[in-house]
Image: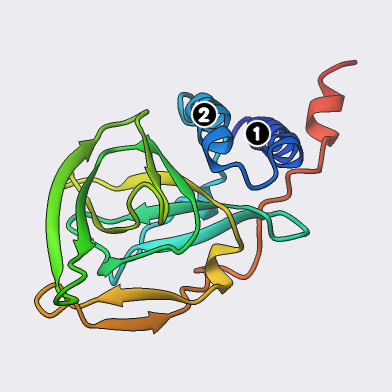
């Protein structure tokens, strides 16, 4: 980690966006996408302890949660071959690829049967931004697209994502199971210590 100020600037800018946009998802996506794209365009700010993979499963590290829980910022760290279950979010979300690449498989529920129907898949290379929400499409499965390297994505959600009830889905039956994801670490980065920056100004 060399420049934690980038994360601090992003959080301050995103807080201003939420304050002026309220619940306007289209505006949040339009302006928030630009902010997230700028953040993931430079890979010099994520602290190393929030970029560590696990051999067992992908990790979800909380980087910041708004005091009113209007949004949260999370780093997802994927070891080679790791994947999520099919799941939803129930809130808006944006995903920016900081390192490596991901594969996203999209699904929707068939109203008549309750079963899942695959609607497509796409690759997310470094720097790309993906959107999710109940309005634009909310059910997917995400995997590390690289067989031999770690991938990292930065997610912004319209809630404290680790503390809300969401759902996983059986891909064959569509059966839904409630889960709360939590986080992989009990601390967040200290974005407020400006001592190193101020020391270089002398």
Is residue 99 visible to us here? Answer: yes
39 above or below 130?
above
Q: Nearer the viewer, residue 199 or 115?
A: 115
Residue occupying the point 66% across, 64% down: 187
Asked whether, in this view, residue 82 is left or right of residue 182, the answer is left
Asked whether, in this view, residue 59 is left or right of residue 56, the answer is right
Residue 17, percent across and down? 69, 35
Residue at which label 1 appears:
10
Q: Nearer the viewer, residue 12 or 121?
A: 121
Q: Residue 84 bears which disc, if any?
A: none
Asked whether, in this view, residue 122 is left or right of residue 127, the answer is left
Pick whichever of labels 1 and 2 is earlier in the sequence: 1
Q: Residue 30 bears which disc, if any?
A: 2
Residue 23, percent across and down? 64, 47
- Quadrant in which the C terminus appears: top right
How many tags in the picture? 2
């Amino acid at each position: 980690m060399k420049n934690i100020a980038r994360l601090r600037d992003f959080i301050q800018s995103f807080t201003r966006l939420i304050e002026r946009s309220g619940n306007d998802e289209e505006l949040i996506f339009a302006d928030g996408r630009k902010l997230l794209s700028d953040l993931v365009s430079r890979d010099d700010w994520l602290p190393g302890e929030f970029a560590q993979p696990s051999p067992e499963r992908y990790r979800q590290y909380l980087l910041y949660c708004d005091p009113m829980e209007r949004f949260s910022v999370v780093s997802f760290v994927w070891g080679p071959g790791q994947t999520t279950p099919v799941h939803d979010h129930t809130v808006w979300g944006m995903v920016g690829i900081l390192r490596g690449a991901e594969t996203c498989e999209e699904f929707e529920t068939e109203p008549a049967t309750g079963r899942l129907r695959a609607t497509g898949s796409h690759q997310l290379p470094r720097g790309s931004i993906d959107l999710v929400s109940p309005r634009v499409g909310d059910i997917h499965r995400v995997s590390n697209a690289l067989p031999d390297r770690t991938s990292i994505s930065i997610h912004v959600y319209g809630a404290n994502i680790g503390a809300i009830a969401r759902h996983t889905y059986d891909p064959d039956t569509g059966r839904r199971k409630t889960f709360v994801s939590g986080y992989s670490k009990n601390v967040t980065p200290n974005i407020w210590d400006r001592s190193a920056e101020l020391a270089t100004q002398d």
